[in-house]
Image (cartoon, grey):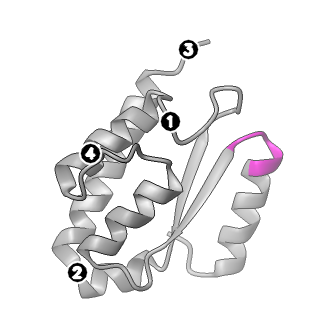
Amino acid sequence: MYRRKSVLDNAEQELTRRGYSVHRLNASTWDAESLHNAFAVGLAFPDYNGRNLDALHDGLRDVAHGDYGWSRDSTGLADTIDAFRAFAQREPDLATAVADALAGASRIGLLSVTA
């Protein structure tokens, strides 16, 4: 979590310079519906992807495997979420579920890395 937006901006620029696909999502106005839409659009989920937490887990797992959302020709994928703290204050249980889904997808992505 970055306390200053400029630090996040610099981190994203450096990741881009190193060849990562970088997607920034803005959580400042998220509710249950808009967060699913943001992930679906930002990571190019297929149209049939549901708009619920199970579908978010599935979609993020598929992104981690490289099925969509980024190019395997890139160094990797970095998703950043702006204003997550504000979202977590409004929707603490949902924010925890989203953080868990992202952590799980990150673990899958790390285990799926090939040399």
Residue at 70% in and 33% down: 74
Q: For the residues marked 2 and 1, what is the alpha-carbon distance in whole angstroms?
A: 28 Å
CB-based contact (under 8 Å), mark 2 and mark 3: no
**Looking at the picture, how far across and down is residue 49, in whole percent?**
30, 47
Residue at 28% in and 79% down: 31
Image mark count: 4
Is residue 39 part of the magenta span, yes or no?
no
Q: Quadrant of residue 24?
A: bottom right
Mark 2 belongs to which amino acid? Glu
Q: For the residues marked 1 and 3, what is the alpha-carbon distance in whole angstroms?
A: 17 Å
Nearer the observer, 11 or 50: 50
Question: Closer to the N terminus: mark 1 or mark 4?
Answer: 4
- Labels 4, 3: front one: 4
User: Disc 2 on helix, strand or loop?
Assistant: loop
Q: For the residues marked 1 and 4, what is the alpha-carbon distance in whole angstroms?
A: 14 Å
Which residue is under mark 2?
Answer: 91
Residue at 65% in and 52% down: 22
Which residue is under mark 4?
Answer: 57
Which residue is under mark 1?
Answer: 68
- Labels 2, 1: front one: 1
Q: Is residue 26 left or right of residue 61?
A: right
**Considering only vertical position in the picture, is 67 above or below 49?**
above
Segment tinted magenta in the rendering: 16-20
Which residue is under mark 3?
Answer: 114
Q: Is residue 96 left or right of residue 45?
A: left
Q: Residues within 10 Å of mark 2 (few under 14, many from 20)?
A: some
- Labels 2, 4: front one: 4
Q: Quadrant of residue 84?
A: bottom left
Mark 4 belongs to which amino acid? His
